[in-house]
């Protein structure tokens, strides 16, 4: 019996049945929206909000503007000041000193990272003070600006504390020369 139908007849019937099916679904589930659309009601009209008993107590309450948690507290030790009250420490060095100081302060963390790498290598390879002096020669040439600076003593103290072997004062004194 199905061989009497052509593909065209089958597709037309399938389209018609599909359209009727979706029309029935639309009428069942979107009946209210379709009625509003056909009657000409505006989409922008919002339904009236239901009032709850406790909402009447809060109407006109001055605390309504504030958050339920309250104002944010400033952390301890911090104060808020106006821009005109903000000031900086006076300059205590001249321009040449300032430039060299900024360069030295920028180099110190780099030197410390290089030293950490050297200490790691020496620790893994079982190096001694002579190996350290030879490896430190590269750091000394790369960061020549540290020699003779006030930061040299702090770097030497770091070397003394973190070296995986005992290091003498004489070796530390001759490191940057």
Image (cartoon, grey):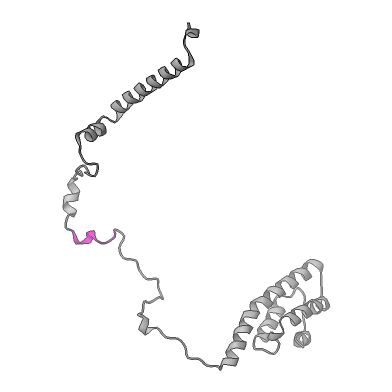
Q: Is residue 62 inside the magenta stretch?
A: yes
Instruction: Identify the residue shown where x is 38% and y is 20%.
Output: 16
Up-down relation of residue 56 to residue 62 (above or below): above
Relative to 127, 4 lies left or right: left
The total number of labels drawn is 0
Q: Quadrant of the C terminus?
A: bottom right
Height in image: 96 above or below 113? below
Q: Residue furthest right?
A: 130
**Residue located 29% across and 60% down the image:** 67
Q: Please tell me in which quadrant of the rendered image residue 23 appears.
A: top left
Q: Read off the magenta span.
A: 61-67
Q: In this view, does 101 lie above or below 19?
A: below
85 to the left or right of 165 = left
Query: Is residue 109 or residue 22 the one in the foreground?
Result: 22
| Most foreground residue, 29 or 62 | 29
Query: Is 152 on the left or on the right of 61, as rendered?
Result: right
Membership of 29 in magenta stretch: no
On the image, the x and y values in percent for residue 59 come to 17, 54
- Picture residue at 75% right of the left edge, 88% below the top: 173
């Amino acid at each position: 019996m199905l061989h009497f139908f052509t593909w065209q007849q089958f597709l037309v019937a399938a389209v018609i049945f599909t359209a009727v099916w979706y029309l029935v679904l639309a009428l069942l589930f979107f009946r209210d929206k379709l009625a509003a659309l056909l009657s000409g009601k505006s989409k922008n009209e919002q339904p009236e909000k239901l009032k709850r008993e406790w909402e009447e107590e809060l109407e006109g309450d001055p605390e309504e503007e504030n958050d339920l948690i309250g104002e944010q507290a400033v952390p301890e030790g911090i104060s808020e000041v106006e821009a005109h009250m903000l000031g900086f420490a006076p300059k205590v060095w001249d321009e040449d000193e300032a430039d060299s100081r900024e360069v030295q302060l920028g180099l110190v963390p780099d030197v410390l990272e290089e030293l950490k790498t050297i200490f790691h290598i020496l620790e893994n390879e079982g190096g001694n003070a002579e190996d350290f002096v030879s490896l430190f020669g590269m750091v000394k040439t790369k960061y020549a600006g540290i020699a003779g600076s006030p930061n040299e003593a702090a770097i030497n103290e770091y070397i003394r504390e973190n070296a995986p072997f005992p290091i003498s004062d004489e070796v530390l004194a001759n490191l940057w020369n």
